[in-house]
């Protein structure tokens, strides 16, 4: 997917410089990007659930006590040097847990079953900005790659569950993925969330975590 475009239907999305609200940079460990459902307001939302108890969890600055859920605009995912694959010239993480690497899931594990048709919701990719190409993929039973998130496009997640897939970037820099959540309630009402921006900071090869964090800090200063 080329990153020099925004995809929408009659909507202009102002991504760059508009989404950053707070200063949490996560560089390793487990987090899940989730669809949430508020039955009181009958609305979908996108949130990031942090799982620091899984070990090798690194976030800066430290989270306040009791905080384990953030809005997407409150966090950046900073890929460490350990995610670089020299033979392929890409950064890859997300599907397998390993020290020093981001372990990111997608799901709807806080949504109860029996609320949405077929217990199914979806993430929709609305647009991307960044210096290179991004892929999200899984491996099938024959170890073949299955693309999950075309640009534009959607992929399904399921109530009370979350899964881990491979994120892949082929150039260093800052990427912003604009996503929405969708779901159809039992009874036929379709719900669509507001858009949310997921931000990824990809370091230059061999630069290490400090350089990646410096890139994130410099970007925040430019946007301040």
Image (cartoon, helix red, strand yellow):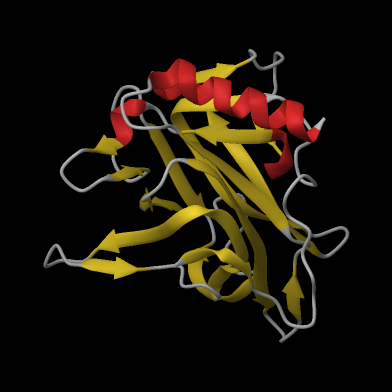
Q: Is residue 192 above or below residue 14?
A: below
Residue 198, percent across and down? 62, 48
Residue 63, percent across and down? 66, 17
**Quadrant holding the C terminus:** top right
Residue 18, percent across and down? 80, 47
Q: Nearer the viewer, residue 70 or 160?
A: 70
The answer to which quarter of the image holds residue 185 is bottom right
Q: Is residue 58 left or right of residue 207?
A: right
Residue 48, percent across and down? 62, 41
Numbered-mark total: 0
Q: Is residue 223 above or below residue 10?
A: above
Q: Residue at x 60, y 28 (%)?
A: 216
Q: Is residue 103 left or right of residue 117?
A: left
Q: Nearer the viewer, residue 181 or 174?
A: 174
Q: Residue at x 62, y 66 (%)?
A: 127
Q: Is residue 3 left or right of residue 191?
A: left
The answer to which quarter of the image holds residue 89 is top left
Q: Residue at x 73, y 55 (%)?
A: 15
Q: Residue 205, can we see it?
A: yes
Q: Is residue 140 above or below residue 70?
A: below
Q: Residue at x 54, y 71 (%)?
A: 120
Q: Nearer the viewer, residue 191 or 201?
A: 201
């Amino acid at each position: 997917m080329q990153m020099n475009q925004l995809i929408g239907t009659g909507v202009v999305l102002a991504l760059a410089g508009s989404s950053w609200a707070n200063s949490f940079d996560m560089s390793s460990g487990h987090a899940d990007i989730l669809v949430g459902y508020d039955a009181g307001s009958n609305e979908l939302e996108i949130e990031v659930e942090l799982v620091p108890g899984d070990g090798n969890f690194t976030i800066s600055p430290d989270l306040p006590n009791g905080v384990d859920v953030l809005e997407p605009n409150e966090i950046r995912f900073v890929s460490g040097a350990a995610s670089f694959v020299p033979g392929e010239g890409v950064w890859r993480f997300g599907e397998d847990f390993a020290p020093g690497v981001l372990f990111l899931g997608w799901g709807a594990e806080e949504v109860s079953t029996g609320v949405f048709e077929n217990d199914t919701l979806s993430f929709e990719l609305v647009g991307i900005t960044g210096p290179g190409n991004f892929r999200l993929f899984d491996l099938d039973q024959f170890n073949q790659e299955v693309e999950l998130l075309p640009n534009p496009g959607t992929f399904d997640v399921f109530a009370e569950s979350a899964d881990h897939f491979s994120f892949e970037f082929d150039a260093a820099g800052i990427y912003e993925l604009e996503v929405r959540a969708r779901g159809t309630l039992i009874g036929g009402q379709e719900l669509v969330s507001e858009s949310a921006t997921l931000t990824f900071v990809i370091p230059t090869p061999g630069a290490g975590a400090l350089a990646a964090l410096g890139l994130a800090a410099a970007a925040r200063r430019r946007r301040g």
